[in-house]
Amino acid sequence: MRCRLLLFLMYGQLLTVQGQSRTDTLLKNLLDREASPALRHILQYPDSFRYQLIYTQIDRDARNRPHFKSYYLEVDGGKYFNPASTVKLPIALLALEKMHQLKVRGLHRNTTMLTDSAWQGQVTVHTDSSAANLLPSVEHYIKKIFLVSDNDAYNRLYEFVGQRTIHEKLWAKGYKDVRIVRRFMPLTEEENRHTNPIRFVDNGKLVYEQPAAYNNQIFDFSREVKLGRAYLDKNDRLVFTPMDFTKHNNLPLMDLQQMLQSVLFPASVPLSQRFDITEDDYRFLYRYMSQYPSETLWPKYDTAEYYDSYTKFFFFKAGKKNIPPYIRVFNKAGWSYGFLTDAAYIVDFKHGVEFMLTGNIYVNRDGVLNDNKYEYEEEGHPFFKEVGEIIYRYELQRKRKHRPDLHNFRINYKE
């Protein structure tokens, strides 16, 4: 009896530990020691700001192979945050993977993609005014996703990949808790299960045709997620109950960072977790994950609105600061409902520094959701900027046995 009681108590303790957030002393102490009063205020209230951080050191061996060591602060896969535009990362990767695996003659990233409609709420898209040839394509959609986090581009690629395929592919790669069930359009759960018919054409000739599809997969919505004290409904009426996120998209922070690592350092993850894309796809991704809106003609952006650090939260976003020419950030950020998230690989070519930093925060003082009144500029962006600067300063003085050869990430953006 005493033995069984002891086992029961040990099992109970194990469940408690597993349900708690993960925090490492190195990261916690570093931030506590360097934080400004404003950052220290945020760090004191993890439940209110719902922040999570992952800092990954990268050390190269004598053969320049990267080795990773991650440190965590308040990271908990069960702590929901709205992933917003970060879901565009796996969708872009899956679109390239599907294009590669179809193995259709004449079908490639630049093939004209015509989206038709076959269900209520769907839109027809046959042109793209931001493209040099005025025609939509998978490649141009991915450019817009990484340059300015374009919602329409994500919607079209969501439809191309298909809701069922999204989950079959991601679950097979080990991302069991990922759920991407929504476009960024005002659609119902049922309408999001329906995806459009799509045609790929070359000079008017049909190359590949994809019929409309419906996904009848059953998703696990058993864990209820409700946030805030009130929200504005679709008619802008104030509803005095928490907003229900139970059936929204879900992308845990650790999964998001793992996806980024699998693209930037594919050899560092098991073959089963890699995306099946070509070497040319990798180079294409590296370019647009790190390129600035000011460096592209197609699409061409108003750089007053889409400044260089528009989607680069760590270091730079607060104050719209210019990024030093010797630093590049390969990342995907997102913001919605008071949540800001960024998964980034940061490279300093001048000092031979590289590291990964992924984090999120929730800033919503009044507790009202969907009212577009969030403290992004006052608290959210300064949080990312200061955390990025603290980690960067630490990386500058951190000893490395071998200086990294970073040529793989040097890109001529003028080509």
Image (tube, rainbow, N blue to C red):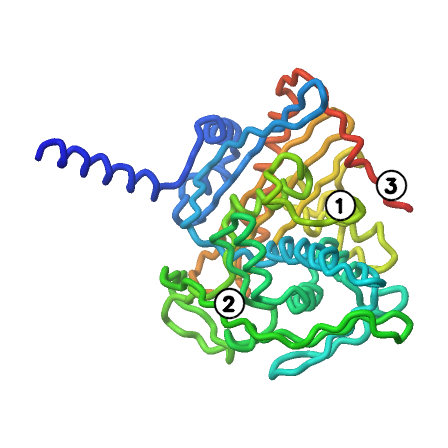
Farthest residue, direction left: 1
Q: Is residue 384 above or below residue 366?
A: above
**Which circle marks residue 338 in the picture?**
none
Q: Which comes before the other along the chain, label 2 or label 1? A: 1
Q: Secondary structure at mark 2?
A: loop
Q: Could you tell me which residue is drawn at 32 percent across and 38 percent down? A: 17
Q: Quadrant of the N terminus?
A: top left
What amino acid type should be assigned to the residue bearing mark 3? Asn
Task: Determine whether, in the image, residue 252 is placed left or right of residue 415.
Answer: left
Between circles 1 and 3, the one closer to the viewer is 1
Q: Position of residue 354 (x, y in %)?
A: 68, 30
**Which circle marks residue 412 in the picture?**
3
Residue picked out by circle 2? 370
What amino acid type should be assigned to the residue bearing mark 1? Tyr
Q: How far is mark 2 from mark 1, CA to CA?
A: 36 Å
Q: Residues within 10 Å of mark 1 (few under 14, many from 20)?
A: some
State if disc 3 and disc 1 touch (CB < 8 Å).
no
Q: How far is mark 2 from mark 3, CA to CA?
A: 41 Å
State if disc 3 and disc 2 touch (CB < 8 Å).
no
Residue picked out by circle 1? 282
Q: Residues within 10 Å of mark 3 (few under 14, many from 20)?
A: few
Q: Position of residue 229 (x, y in %)?
A: 38, 64
Q: Quadrant of the rendered structure where residue 85 is? A: bottom right
